[in-house]
Image (cartoon, coloured by chain):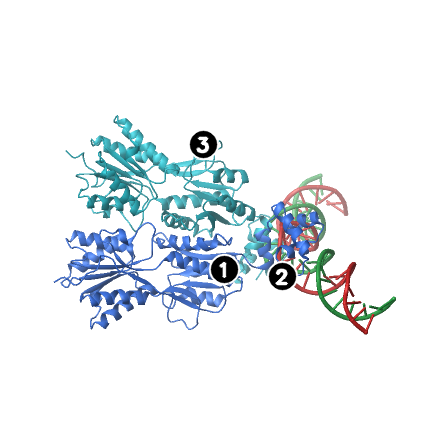
Chain colours: A cyan, B blue, C red, D green
Amino acid sequence: MNLKQLSSMLGLSQTTVSRALNGYPEVNEETRRRVADAARRHGYRPNPSARRLATGKAGMIGYVMPTGASVDIDPHFVEFLSGLGDYARSHELDLVLSPAEADDEETTYRRVAAAKNVDAVYVSVPVPNDPRIALLHQLGLPFIVHGRSEGLDFAYPYIDIDNEGAFHEAGRLLVQLGHRRIALINGDERQTFAIFRERGARRALAGGGLELAPSMIRSVQMTEENGYLSARSLLEGEQAPTAILCSSLIMALGVSRALREAGLSVPDDVSLIAHDDVFPWLKPENFPVPLSTTRSSIRAAGARIAERLAARISGLEDGSRGEVWPVDLVVRGSVAGVPP
Amino acid sequence: MNLKQLSSMLGLSQTTVSRALNGYPEVNEETRRRVADAARRHGYRPNPSARRLATGKAGMIGYVMPTGASVDIDPHFVEFLSGLGDYARSHELDLVLSPAEADDEETTYRRVAAAKNVDAVYVSVPVPNDPRIALLHQLGLPFIVHGRSEGLDFAYPYIDIDNEGAFHEAGRLLVQLGHRRIALINGDERQTFAIFRERGARRALAGGGLELAPSMIRSVQMTEENGYLSARSLLEGEQAPTAILCSSLIMALGVSRALREAGLSVPDDVSLIAHDDVFPWLKPENFPVPLSTTRSSIRAAGARIAERLAARISGLEDGSRGEVWPVDLVVRGSVAGVPP
DNA sequence: GCACGTTCTCAAAGCGCTTTGAAGGAGACC
DNA sequence: GGTCTCCTTCAAAGCGCTTTGAGAACGTGC
């Protein structure tokens, strides 16, 4: 059932039917009702390819997904998807994933932009001076960044959480409890979120007259194993930390394991605070000792990003507003004063 | 730069240019070379919307993604995506995710099929008599199932792992080691993979003259917490198991925690075998006691599914071949003979 | 009764590609 | 020289929608 058939069936022109269905004002209400009715009865749905060709609008949002033989997609991504679904499922908004060679995303961004398959894209885990953002800016393809870049000479729309604030607050708590040897097990140091977290932690320590020595920092891909290895290497040092800030719950699993293996207990020997992106399958309150966290739901961010992307597509939003969401510090059993 | 411009620039008709670029035989080699050259130099790329409208082919594959306020997307999904990327990134094959209300996927499948946005879809985690498979079969939209259904009266293409064989082998090992009280912590019992695993375990026990009592089975969503709760409730019983089969590494985390909390050690008090889908961020060899597993990479399956979907789209594959992949049993320190 | 807005509807021209059916040109064969 | 083929190329007709520019139809006001 296409427009032609439907309109001839109704004895109307394609124009009128199209306008009736798309809510244009110059159609008689009575006619509109008749058309809408017939469309529903016959299950008419405009062919998106045709509509796209005619309007240039795709009604889909895109994501360029870095992949590679030695590249693993981040498990956080499913949480983002859950959030996206929260908004998108009721708006018939689809997401197009375009896999890209991780060390050459530009080609794929150009392909996506040229193809006009999608009306807007979202960009995740930015780095300072992110070339993807500059490229999208230049190509004129609407986008929203999940996270922030630094050093770009133009404004762009984003949603980010207050990573610096979160780690500042967590660090400050530890300092207030008397800890002086505080370590940070962070994500990839090239990524802005990790830079901000380090900055927050550093500022917190400075507030207590302390420094965050390079020997107390680890920057690694966020796996259980890396959490374990990082913690172990920290604990081996002369100046083993009495408190650890950790950038992810998954790494915190490994940190727990290393502590247990070293015969150290939480929080008596070592205090532990991790960032919690709110996974449904791994909860901080279920750690052997309930884990203190800085908490912010990626899922909620995903829903908000979908919403803003949809708004940009339909012209309801423009400009380059940045949103920074506050992060909750949730104190549970894993922190205590410095051991005697 | 579109076809019209390119062809007038070359002094050729659109027909010839189109054919030259699409590899039709009736074009002079010399002409083809000229055309290809000019296309490359001017960065010409056919507009996919136009091509799609003309051919009806989208060059994209789809996935209807069940979502809902209380529905969480499975973390296994990113592994699938990594695998998909392994194949798709070099083939410019995009994936369209269409979020659906989890309790009414049919509507979305119909929308996707009608929209012709995608040439084929993949279906994951099927249940017996899966209505989605029946629907796709009826709609004539090409698809491949990741997993298997049961009870459908037609054949369909799928890729599955030998879940029954895997759990049979794992169970048999435990039986051979003398265990008589063996428990199964499984995924959602409605899903085929869980049914097959139970079947495998049951058959293994039967081989030793044993029965898998309902009281020794848990069917839950695969989270750390549910692993913990299931294990705890099993250990509380009169007839606490001396061995546990577990359907996921994530649940095995919780099982470990429950055992530790109960003061039981692996493998002296309880042997443990889990299914490992091969997450890069959580490895069985890094469990406190290296975990024995039945191993099968979801990522590899993702790549294979992308490949087969692409083949179906381009007409290289048809019919309804099912592939069943064997599963490795990897024995590590977490299994031992039955405690005295 | 006529000119003039309004309101509603329409034919036709795109959007950029693929594909059908046909035609021009060059050899080959008789 | 004429006819037949084969090889290349082409004009034009879709694909199914939106949108422009224009035309009926119908009051209204003078």
| Callout 1 touching callout 2 (CB < 8 Å) | no
Q: Which residue is mark 3?
A: A151
Say if A325 sits above or below B167 in the image: above
The image's mark for residue A250 is none
Quick one: SS at disc 2?
helix
The amino acid beneath tag 2 is: Ser
The disc labelled 1 sits on which kind of residue? Ala
Where residue B110 sits in the image (x, y, percent)?
Answer: 48, 61
Residue nearest the viewer, comparing D13 with B158? B158
Res. A209 visible in picture: yes
Left or right relative to C23: residue B122: left
Residue A339 vs residue A170, the one in the foreground: A339
Instruction: Characterize the local packing of mark 1: few (<14), some (14-19) or many (20 or more) Cα atoms within 10 angstroms.
Output: many
Mark 1 on the same chain as mark 3: no
Q: Which residue corresponds to mark 1?
A: B310
The mark closer to the camera, 2 or 3, is 3
Q: Give percent across and percent down for residue A74.
A: 37, 47
Q: Nearer the viewer, residue B157 or D2?
A: D2
Residue drawn at (31%, 36%) of the image = A166
Real-space Cα distance between discs 1 and 2? 38 Å
Asked if both marks, 1 and 2, belong to the same chain, the answer given is no
Disc with the residue nearer the chain's start (2 vs 3) = 2
Measured along the vertical axis of the image, is residue A208 above or below residue A141?
A: above
Residue found 51% across the figure and 39% down from its top:
A135
Q: Position of residue B339 (x, y in %)?
A: 14, 61
Q: In this figure, which residue is indicated by the disc labeled 2? A: A8
Q: Nearer the viewer, mark 1 or mark 2?
A: 1
Q: Please, what secondary structure does the residue beneath circle 1 have?
A: helix
Mark 2 burial class by Cα count in 10 Å: few <14, some 14-19, many 20+: few
